[in-house]
């Protein structure tokens, strides 16, 4: 073995030892999921910002608009328990009544300190791509292990019809997302993430928004332990689990009785 090869091998060993000694430092900075929210830890950074780009076909509203979407977001921890989450999105196509969306949520982290339980509740408001005002509620539950994280989100949506109109949407929608990630290394997490909408369509033939829909696919997040930057990627097929006996709601911005599609979403985040 040459001297230069020995130095290179020694450098790799030292790098691996350095990364392996701080597995939690990286994940206090990196956004673990693309679609699911996780309450911010009091031990982690107080602020984070993110930018997402997504492309998909035959989607449903919980995933975003058809074709290209760009989204920016910010999270800030207010004290030990409260996290404010703001997001704004822009749709490149004109297929929806509005090409912009914005939402704000406030989460209360109820998880007891000192164990792995993840528990939070939240309230908020949104203006969606159909230009409809929507009241939001959210419940987050899950568990943290030393090298893994499981989180489920249930988001409740109540749309407000415009004056003089009758809303074609359900009075109360339930959107769910579930994600699981595991540390492949101190800088890389891999897992699976799913988003579902209108699951009541599995038992209700007259569900107002086209029937039950789900996306399921792999997720990846990366971030060096010494860096404030992180990146994520999630992709998967969109499946139609049921079909409604009534036409899709006009507020959905698309015909929801289409066959399944796909989505790819990437995210870059910075925490401090």
Image: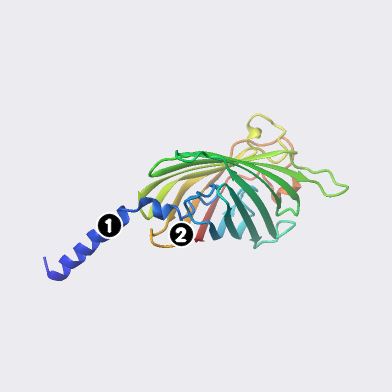
Would residue 271 appear left or right of 163 to someone viewing this image? left
Q: Residues within 10 Å of mark 1 (few under 14, many from 20)?
A: few
Residue 19: percent from the left, percent from the top?
32, 56
Q: Residue drawn at (46%, 62%), measured in percent from left and top?
A: 229
Q: Residue drawn at (81%, 46%), measured in percent from left and top?
A: 161
Residue 266: percent from the left, percent from the top?
51, 58
Q: Relative to the observer, which residue lies in front, 9 or 78?
A: 78
Q: Is residue 119 above or below residue 188?
A: above
Q: Relative to the observer, which residue lies in front, 126 or 61?
A: 126
Residue 170: percent from the left, percent from the top?
74, 39
User: Who comes first in sequence, dot 2 or dot 1?
Assistant: 1
Q: Is residue 173 above or below residue 264?
A: above
Would residue 192 appear left or right of 159 to someone viewing this image? left
Mark 2–mark 1 CB contact (< 8 Å): no
Q: Residue drawn at (19%, 63%), measured in percent from left and top?
A: 10
Q: Secondary structure at mark 2?
A: strand
Q: Secondary structure at mark 1?
A: helix
Question: Which residue was labeled with disc 2?
Answer: 230
Q: Residue furthest left?
A: 1
- Tell me which corner region of the image, top left, top right, bottom left or bottom right, holds residue 131: bottom right
């Amino acid at each position: 073995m040459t001297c230069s090869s020995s130095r290179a091998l020694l450098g790799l060993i030292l790098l691996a030892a350095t990364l392996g000694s701080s597995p939690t430092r990286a994940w206090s900075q990196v956004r673990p999921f693309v679609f699911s929210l996780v309450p911010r830890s009091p031990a982690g950074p107080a602020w984070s910002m993110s930018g997402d780009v997504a492309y998909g076909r035959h989607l449903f509203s919980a995933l975003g608009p058809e074709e290209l979407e760009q989204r920016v977001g910010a999270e800030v921890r207010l004290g030990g328990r409260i996290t404010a989450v703001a997001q704004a999105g822009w749709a490149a196509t004109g297929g929806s009544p509005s090409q912009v969306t914005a939402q704000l949520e406030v989460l209360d982290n109820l998880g007891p300190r000192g164990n792995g339980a993840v528990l939070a509740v939240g309230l908020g408001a949104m203006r969606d791509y159909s230009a409809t005002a929507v009241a939001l509620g959210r419940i987050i539950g899950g568990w943290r292990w030393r090298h893994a994280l499981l989180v489920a989100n249930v988001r409740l949506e109540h749309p407000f019809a415009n004056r003089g109109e009758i809303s074609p949407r359900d009075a109360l929608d339930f959107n769910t997302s579930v994600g699981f990630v595991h540390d492949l290394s101190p800088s890389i997490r891999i897992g699976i993430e799913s988003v579902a909408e209108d699951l009541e369509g599995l038992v209700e033939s007259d569900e107002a928004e086209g029937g039950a829909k789900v996306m399921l696919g792999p997720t990846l997040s990366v971030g060096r332990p010494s860096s404030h930057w992180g990146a994520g990627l999630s992709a998967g097929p969109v499946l139609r689990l049921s079909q409604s006996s009534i036409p899709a709601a006009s507020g959905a911005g698309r015909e929801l009785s289409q066959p399944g599609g796909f989505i790819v979403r990437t995210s870059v985040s910075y925490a401090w």
